[in-house]
Image: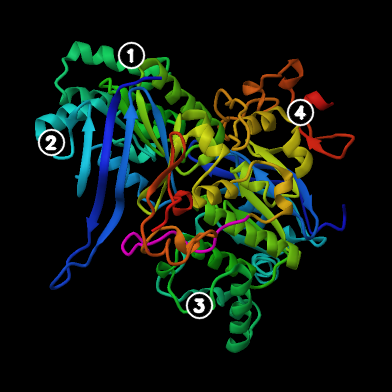
Amino acid sequence: MNNGLLQVEELRLHYRTTQGVVQAVDGITFSLAPGQALAVLGESGCGKSSLARAILRLLPRNVEVYDGCVRVNGLDVMLLDEEQFRRDVRWSKISIVMQAAMNALNPVLRVADQVIEPLLVHQDRQHDAALARVRDVFQMVGVPLDFMARYAFELSGGMRQRVVLAMALVLKPPLVLLDEPTSALDVLTQANIMNVLKRIKRDTSTSFILITHDIATSSELADQVAVMYAGQLVEISDAARFFRESLHPYSQKLMASVPRLRDDTKLEYIPGRPPSLINLPRGCRFAPRCPQRFAKCDQDPPMMHTEDSRQVRCWLYE
Amino acid sequence: MQHSTLLSVRHLHTWYELRQRAFGRAGSVRAVDDVTFDLAEGETIAVVGESGCGKSSLAKTILGLYRPTQGEIVFQGQPIHAAKAATLRWYRRQVGFVQQDPYGALPPFMNVHRILAEPLIIHGIRKAQREERIREVLEEVKLVPITDFITKFPHMLSGGQQQRVVIARAILLRPQLIVADEPVSMLDASVRVEILELLRNLQRVHRLAVIYITHDLSAVRHFSERIFVMYGGKIVEKGKVADLLRNPLHPYTRALLRAIPDADATNAETDRDVPPGEPPSLLHPPPGCRFHPRCPLVTPGLCDMLEPPECEPEPLHLTLCWLYKDTKP
């Protein structure tokens, strides 16, 4: 797996707060091949958005710990200084569609002028050439070209989300992080955006990391699934097997809580609440809520590699 | 299954007038446009639709927060749409409201006890009974041990716990009807199931009628008996959950069902079949059927001219669509 596009090893991002240290990202390891989509699933507060920030080095001021290794095409970008990282990695190699970004478009700029900005900053292109690229990317995401001169407030939610997506794609980065790209949208609009993402993935072999709590929608794009709980990944699997039968008790419970339109299985919920990221329980972090816990769960489980090349952080699979 | 009717809504219209410009009127937003239905005692219906289809306006009109522009709301034989203050006061004890965003719905400067005491004070209930009732509802929504929660302020509670307080407040005055506007859309999947089950249990125990407003069709089957599909201010399809999911009649309902994925890896292989375009403006709705500009089965000269009639191709399964009308004008 050394020819991966992205390799993340033991990535940690802890925040300092008045109540203590929040271990939002706590030793994350995974890799992603070109043209693949990884869905990172987890409930709110599990650290999934912090993971995206840690990969793109978009850090707040109260960072306590930020270490580990992020390799992009084999190059450890954690060693780059801030300016190199900004110039060579952020947006040109990895871009992001932030959660609710469609509501963060600049209200006083025409949308094309916002999408063109990365081209002018990063590639030093002539305005005309850059504009041609903006036109291409608008077509790719399905924004009619006569919307280019409009302002954000003149567009519907779905169109604004496409504009934000265009902004992330305009430099043709090999990897795009999507943080809850459709959760604020309606069902039909959501399906439309997922269709656009599928087409882009097929046509341009862009890789995606899709961060979401919406498991049903994540299955539209994912080749691989990683489940996050309390700052750690607890399972990494290919999508086909994950959606059929997941391994980790948390993943299983999570899947059982998702209503399905086409069958009538009884829904379950997970009793209790996720642990605070400040005072994490000793041993397995899911153990206090786990129906299958046993004596060994008092010890911290490592990531186990199963025979069929899936990974799960649970003593049941030792 | 013979229930008596609790609420009946007839030709309800809620239009919002736009601000006037110089002379003449600027027009109105037709958020609820000719909605008719009956709700039986103890029955749960789900109103499903996309944002801007008028479902929240419908909820608020039923709650008596907006006056309908036209039409009737009759609750237990009492007309509400033009009621006087005394009747409205009585009515507001009979209906509870569960808001979408629990944090926004709870006053941040009141603790749980105060939040729950407020409606009881307003409705003139004596102190001893108030304390008892507050304890009862907290137990019912399973915020136990009560002493842990009663002094807490909303920001000290998790999203699920906040929503439990909102539900406790809604059932406090022993209403007969609960209107829940997207009660779980802000919550995580697992908490969502927990809260919906709580609502379902309360509904069964107290024989509450529930109007459950949502955009999430996949959860609906577990928590309601009938589904109403709303589009462009109108209810375009009404039916029992099983009928509607098995045999969706209106082209919009079909599109909606096709667009919803179930968690399945094969989804990644195919594109979803989604109708083009966007929901109509409620200010200038398209003539004829509101869905005709996006409908794959449109009949030109009919659907774009005349409003479709209500048809009943299956018993108790109604739709507003020309497809099911044999004699066309």
Left or right position of A317 against A90: right
Residue at 61% across, 74% down: A139
Query: Label 3 belongs to which residue?
Result: A148
Asked if the residue under mark 2 is in contact with the one under mark 4, i.e. CB atoms within 8 Å, the reply is no
Amino acid on which the number 4 mark rests in the picture: Cys
Identify the subunit bearing mark 2: B
Marks 4 and 1, how far apart at CA: 41 Å
Residue range (magenta): B273-286
Which numbered disc flags the more N-terminal residue, 1 or 2? 2
Residue at 51% across, 40% down: B217
Marks 4 and 2, how far apart at CA: 62 Å
Which numbered disc flags the more N-terminal residue, 3 or 4? 3
Figure check: B63 above or below A208: above
Left or right position of B131 against A16: left
Image position, residue A31 (x, y; %) = 79, 51
Disc 3 and disc 4 on one polypeptide chain: yes
- Residue B136's mark? 1
Disc 1 and disc 2 on one polypeptide chain: yes
Query: Label 2 belongs to which residue?
Result: B83
Figure check: A207 above or below B82: below
Asked if the residue under mark 3 is in contact with the one under mark 1, i.e. CB atoms within 8 Å, the reply is no
**Colouring scheme applied when the structure was drawn:** rainbow
Amino acid on which the number 3 mark rests in the picture: Met
Amino acid on which the number 1 mark rests in the picture: Glu
